[in-house]
Amino acid sequence: MSGMDKIHNAAEDLKGKVKEGVGKLTDNERLEAEGQADQASASAKQAGEKVKDAAGDVKDALTD
């Protein structure tokens, strides 16, 4: 995973946590749900990047 991808995913996760927190404080269910969706999206992207990294490691191991 590139450094920029990590930063982008972490920022998206943080944005989701903030939205969820503000939604809870203001009793805004829509904002809370958006925050949870942002966090889920960031987690899915991170998992996808980890799979790509692992596949690259396997490829490197096989070619060495």
Image (tube, grey):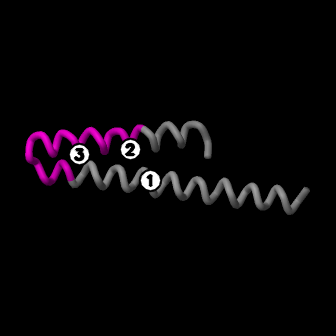
**Residue labelled with disc 1:** 43
Question: Mark 1: which secondary structure?
Answer: helix
Name the residue rendered at 59%, 37% in the picture: 3
Q: Earlier in the sequence, mark 2 or mark 1?
A: 2
- Distance of label 1 from label 3 (alpha carbons): 15 Å
- Distance of label 3 from label 2 (alpha carbons): 10 Å
Above or below 53: residue 2: above
- In the displayed orientation, state which residue is furthest to the right: 64
Q: Pointer 2 and pointer 1: residues touching (CB < 8 Å)?
A: yes
Q: Amino acid at mark 3?
A: Glu
Query: Is 16 left, or right, of 62 in this rendering?
Result: left
**Residue labelled with disc 2:** 13
Name the residue rendered at 13%, 53% in the picture: 29
Question: Which quadrant: the C terminus?
Answer: bottom right
Name the residue rendered at 70%, 61% in the picture: 55
Per the rendering, the mark at residue 20 is 3
Q: Amino acid at mark 1?
A: Ser
Question: Mark 3: which secondary structure?
Answer: helix
